[in-house]
Amino acid sequence: MSKPSNDAKNAEQKLYSMREVCKRTGFPYETLKFYCNKGLVPNLKRSEGNYRLFDENDIGWIESLKCLRRCGMSIEEMQRYKDLCMQGRKSIPEHRKILAEKLENLRKEQEKIQASIDFILWKNNLYNDIESGKVPYKSFLLKNPDKE
């Protein structure tokens, strides 16, 4: 018995509509359409009615696009990253370079967010201490904070 051809395998593979992919990935319909129009989803398939169709590999890549965008990549950067991915293994060093830059930026943002969280926690603790009478109320804005 011979192995099934790639055409037979592809015919058996489930394909999903834009709406199904959006529901599954949480992607807004217009965003996915925009990404497709920008060429960010390669190997795009079409139905007989010219509707976009996606397979499991496409959905995995769309999830990756969502993460790349959350990492702060611009559309142009995502296009560059996709182009590198299309080159296969040989482009992995360039992938690493791009991701290392994004990771550095995210860590800087994380430090800023942590500083903001620390400030809010400190202020809440200060307010608890003021309300419990442990420390007097002081304000940078009121000349006479005791006369509220």
Image (spheres, rainbow, N blue to C red):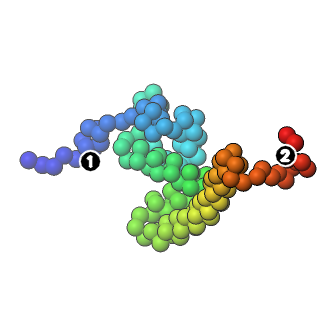
Task: Specify the amino acid type for callout 2.
Answer: Asp
Name the residue nearer the viewer: 43 or 127.
127
Name the residue nearer the viewer: 79 or 72.
72
Residue 38, image x, y percentages: 58, 46
Residue under circle 2? 146
Question: Total label count?
Answer: 2
Name the residue nearer the viewer: 53 or 28.
28
Residue under circle 1? 6
- CA gap between label 2 and label 1 equals 80 Å
Q: Secondary structure at mark 2?
A: loop
Q: Where 145 falls versus 24 (above or below)?
A: below
Please tell me which residue is depicted at 56% across the width and 51% down the height of the picture: 70
Split into 4 quadrants, where in the image is the C terminus? top right
Residue 90, image x, y percentages: 43, 70
Residue 37, image x, y percentages: 57, 42
Using the rendered image of the protein, determine whether residue 16 is visible from the camera's viewpoint.
yes
Using the rendered image of the protein, determine whether residue 105 is visible from the camera's viewpoint.
no
Please tell me which residue is depicted at 78% across the width and 50% down the height of the picture: 137
Give left or right: position of 21 versus 34.
Answer: left
Task: Specify the amino acid type for callout 1.
Answer: Asn
Numbered tag placed on residue 58 in the rendering: none
Q: Which one is in front in this view, the residue at disc 2 or the one at disc 1?
A: 2
Mark 2 closeness class: few <14, some 14–19, many ≥20 residues within 10 Å: few
Residue 42, image x, y percentages: 47, 49
Q: Secondary structure at mark 1?
A: helix
Q: Earlier in the sequence, mark 2 or mark 1?
A: 1
Mark 1 closeness class: few <14, some 14–19, many ≥20 residues within 10 Å: few
Q: Where 97 falls versus 75 (above or below)?
A: below
